[in-house]
Amino acid sequence: MKLKNGTVENEEIVIDDRLIFNVIGPEIVLKNCVIQSKVPTSALGIRGTLEDTTIVAKKPLNGFYWYDVSLIRCKFVGKFHNNRFGSRNGSSGLVEQCDFSQADIDGAVFYSGSVEKHIFPKWPFLVVFVTEDNILQLEKSALKDENVEDVLEHIKVLHKERKAICYDARKMAKIFNVSLDDIKRSFSGFDFIKF
């Protein structure tokens, strides 16, 4: 499947050919469409502009980079682990007012834009909005709480342009060998962490 240029409206686009590299090119505009992706990350490249479009990952899209895509009021459904959204290092990416409430975006990192305007998945996911002031607050708390210390170390290794990071508390609890309640207790005192 190759969509190179033009505008496509109100269409369902099924991407299911795993034997080729499927492309949505930089000159394409998709409006009010539904993209059903049934291919792995290695078989898909997306550029261009997606407006009011639903992206459904029938097969997990792990480690997908959306750096050259404008995502405006899009909805995500399915697994998008370790995805990267927005503009980084001068890329053309944009992500505005998107709905991730039906998506598993564990490990997703958001660069640029107004990340507070997105709809994020509810508990057991948590979203950390990252600013220098917020990092200072986490550093103070990390002295008393190993869970906070572990997350802080992860945040610090990411590129400085990051604005928000999403975590699945179930995975955190398993990695840290603590309960979900322990995770919630560790992070509930911060107004810049959303459940």
Image (cartoon, rainbow, N blue to C red):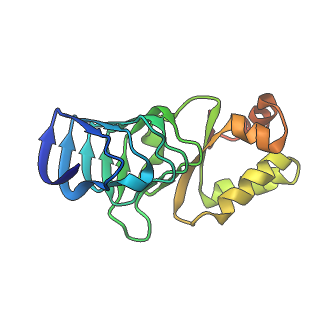
Q: Which residue appears at 59% of the width and 48% of the height?
A: 107
Given the current orientation, which residue lies at the most extreme front position?
A: 19
Residue 184 at x, y percent in the picture: 74, 33
Q: Is residue 74 visible?
A: yes
Q: Is residue 136 visible?
A: no
Determine whether 166 is above or below 154 in the image. Answer: above
Residue 81 quadrant: top right
Residue 17 at x, y percent in the picture: 31, 45
Judge from the rendering whether residue 6 lies leftward or rightward of residue 162; answer left or right: left
Residue 154 at x, y percent in the picture: 69, 57
Given the current orientation, which residue lies at the most extreme bottom position?
A: 89
Residue 147 at x, y percent in the picture: 80, 46
Residue 45 quadrant: bottom left
Q: How many marks?
A: 0
Residue nearest the viewer, comparing 11 with 154: 11
Given the current orientation, which residue lies at the most extreme left position?
A: 6
Q: Which residue appears at 58% of the width and 43% of the height?
A: 106
Query: Which quarter shows the C terminus?
Result: top right
Judge from the rendering whether residue 191 lies leftward or rightward of residue 52; answer left or right: right
Q: Which residue appears at 78% of the width and 38% of the height?
A: 174
Judge from the rendering whether residue 51 lies leftward or rightward of residue 127; answer left or right: left
Determine whether 18 is above or below 14 in the image. Answer: below
Q: Which residue appears at 61% of the width and 63% of the height?
A: 158
